[in-house]
Image: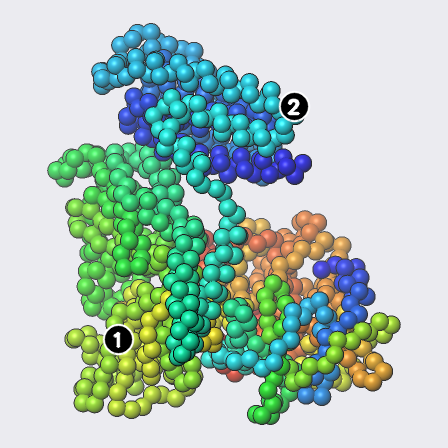
Amino acid sequence: MDDDAEIIAEFLVESHENLDQLDRDLVELEQQPGSRERLSSIFRTIHTIKGTSGFLAFNRLEQLTHVGETLLSRLRDGDAVMTPAVTGALLSMVDTVRALLDGIERTGKDTDPTVDVLPLVAVIEGLLEDGLPTTASSSTPPADETSPVDEVSAIDEAAEEPDVSPAASSVAPSNRSDDVPLAAATDVVVDAETPETDAGWDGVDRRTRVESSVRVDIDLLDDLVDLVGELVLTRNQLVQRSLGSADVELVRASQRLDLVASELQESVMKTRMQPIGQVWSKFPRVVRDLSHQLGRDVDLVMEGQETELDRSLLEAVKDPLTHLVRNSLDHGIERPEDRLAAGKSAKGTLSLRAFHESGQVVVEITDDGKGIDPERIAAVALERGVVTRDQLSQMDSREVLGLIFRPGFSTAAAVSNISGRGVGMDVVRTNIERIGGSVDVTSEIGRGTTTRVRIPLTLAIIPALVVGEGEERYAIPQANLVELVRIEGDDLRRQVEDIAGAPVLRLRGKLLPLVSLSEILGGPAPEGESVTVVVLQSDEVRFGLCVSTVFDTQEIVVKPIGRQLKGLAMYAGATIMGDGRVALILDVAGTAVTAGVGSAQQETADTRAVAADDRTALLVLEVADGRRAALPLTAVSRLEEFSQDRIERSGASEVVQYRDGLLPLVRLATAIGLVDTSSRTDQISVVVHETAGAAGGAVGIVIDRVLDVVDVAIVSSHVGRRDGVTGSAVVQDRVTDLVDLAAVVARSGVPA
Amino acid sequence: MSVTATASAGTAVEQYCTFWVADLFFGVAVAEVQEVLRAQPMTPVPRAAGAVTGLINLRGQIVTAVDLRVRLGLPPRASDQLPMNVIVRSRGEVVSLLVDDIGDVIDTAGVDGQPAPANMPRKVQDLVCKERGVLPLADAILLVLDADRAVDVSTASDNPGGTP
């Protein structure tokens, strides 16, 4: 049984990879209908899936891929040509195969009732019966295809061999499967590919790839990275010691160790690297589907697919990049008629470019659409209350464009299902900043827009500036570092001034807010005849951090810190220095918030407070039959389910026995003045809130169900304010009551 | 956790790694203790909760050190007295408990746990394991520490540093 599960898991991984390739191939095939390469590649993929699914008794999957394969073999052999109907059918086949595979992943079977294969099988069979032979028998290729005639005959020759091999391969498993177990059979499927690829165009290419790579468990790679991190630290300690040593052999050995460890580190980091093309592989399909849906005509150009990124980062940028691509299609590139009217070619171009630049990976998403009009952005931002007129008047056009990344901003006149929900761009920015990246936009009206996303190469090892404060050292990620400024004597008096008690530095005509690291860390204000200012940038926020000592820059290994310190936004983690001591890594964005340095445009104290406090993780709940309420996630210690019969009464209140004690229950709906519907099911959902009071008790808040956890900037309104509710906010496009926890807890009789 | 599971786990625990915090004699089930170390170089974490003394480097792993004296509401250690580290595993993380002195590993077979006496300070009661309670041994009274609660500084009411 376990063997089976393993084989199925491997089959799923392989098939998903193949399907991504298939999407790409099909879209390209639509553009070059005669391409034998593409057809062979598609045929092979489907053939492999079919073979394995037959073997694993996924009958519906086999049935579907079988007709698909037949259709493809006709196309490949030149008995049929690509038409939009054929492409559509093949794409739906890919989608359905994917859905079946998802079902297999969940249940281990391909009998998911929500996925219906028969209608699609019928469509493809219909195409096989009537649509295609006519095209083939007429022997007159469509008007736009005169050249492929030669190719068709060429295919005939080449096709002879592949025609034989599928038959041979389908025999092979049945011969062997009696004595050789399943694992061998999957090998057979791979083997079956080879005779085909030999006859095909890219046989050598593919074969070497198969033979020269192995699959490795991600956990193993992560362990390796950890171990190498430790090795590097030990190396640092040893090298430092050996420097003062008179033992020549020791010095030589430690130098060698130094070199080897560096190379090992580099190689191990490389094993986690994957080309960004893996994320991009979905885009041709996304662009094709969207442009059909939106009535756009778009060329997708991709450059630098081979640019590599750490796999954890790749995963993290997938959604933001997809969103940006969708945005370009929806808001950037115009309809063909509008483009012609503007004197551009009807076909728009969306280009993706990835490249390395100063230790970062840059991904540019460029469209030649209508561009972004800063005036329109400004108008909308004013209307939505994203900025005030005063703030706006101080912004240059680049900063105005940056407004599209603010929460609650969206210029789409109508909400479409592609983009324009006003949650997109700020989420894009948050997600990219979370992994230490940044995103900015440049645009020229009428010419197009470029969005530039900068991503660090890896999360595990980063270059950092090490500074000293008091007895301790702190590491500042170099990605946030702009420059170092040292000011002494007279310059100090001239260039550093206090504005209402807040020190600012005149730096080349701009005012830079200054923050003292010592003070942020709870120490005294720095004094003396000189200051060293580390100028830091965290997206829109630029500020100067005054430090007492600057050591050097070095590559540090980022280590996580315990959950006791998770609440401290100032720290991104910790690292181990060459002498074995621990140093904290500053989170520049978190430090800015802690120090109360708002973004450059938000200068007044109260907007700063908003910026600092408003991004909160909320637990969104359903109460009273579809009404939404939210609690701060920090107040939630556990989610529990109790069956109704565990509810007992103690005095006037409901309680359940919980962790050797009693957990008083509060019905949230009742507490916030709604009709309670939480008793409709046999189980009640309870949010356990541990109160901070001296008694240290807990309260169970009874809800209908948990909807989601969201990280949002709350723009709270007093609308809906009542007992138990502090107000309401729009969360995920829905009006949501913000629960007044203290009032709700008070109803349970437990001191808050 | 179900009631039966804790009960059976409770009876299975008979060996405790013991230590002193001021004059209190504590024990943690040996299975929860990873190792015991002398005083380690410590990197303080400004603005962290008061009980978090700092971070130590445990063979390349960064471990948070939580001072049990602070957690128990006891006066700070004398400045010349170096704490010992009891490294425990708690909810998937490794945390160091700073204690005054290390005792033996003792076997408590045959001694039944009793609930913590009600007149003990609240902060001490809080950290005594609810299942095993207090074990009256022949020559001492062993308080069984609830390590998960001891390292959970977020629920502590003392938080002078404050989170921003």
Q: State the residue position of label 2.
A: A178
Which residue is drawn at the image coordinates 55% and 30% (left, top)? A186
Task: Write down the chain letter for disc 2.
Answer: A
Q: What element carries label 2?
A: loop
Query: In the rendered view, does B93 fall on the left or right side of A258?
Result: right
Instruction: Say which of A520 and A372 sits in front.
Output: A520
Q: Label 2 is placed on what type of residue?
A: Asp
Q: Label 1 is placed on what type of residue?
A: Leu
Q: Is residue A413 visible?
A: no
Q: Can residue A274 be seen in this view?
A: yes
Q: Going from the N terminus, do you reach mark 2 or mark 1 first?
A: 2
Q: How many marks?
A: 2
Residue A552: x %, y % from top left = 33, 74
Q: Residue furthest left?
A: A343
Task: Write down the chain letter for disc 1.
Answer: A
Which residue is drawn at the image coordinates 35% and 58% (left, top)? A456
Disc 2 vs disc 1: which is toward the camera? 2
Residue A287: x %, y % from top left = 32, 37
Compared to residue B110, the image places residue A78 above or below, namely above
Q: Residue furthest right?
A: B110
Query: In the rendered view, does A549 fall on the left or right side of B138?
Result: left
Marks 2 and 1 on same chain: yes
Instruction: Quadrant for the C terminus of chain A, please.
Output: bottom right
Compared to residue A343, the image places residue A700 above or below, namely below
Which residue is drawn at the image coordinates 53% and 63% (left, top)? A633
Query: In the rendered view, does A469 fall on the left or right side of A358?
Result: right
Q: In which quarter of the image is residue A74?
A: top left
The color scheme shown is rainbow
Q: State the residue position of label 1.
A: A484
**Spatial CA span between label 2 and label 1:** 72 Å
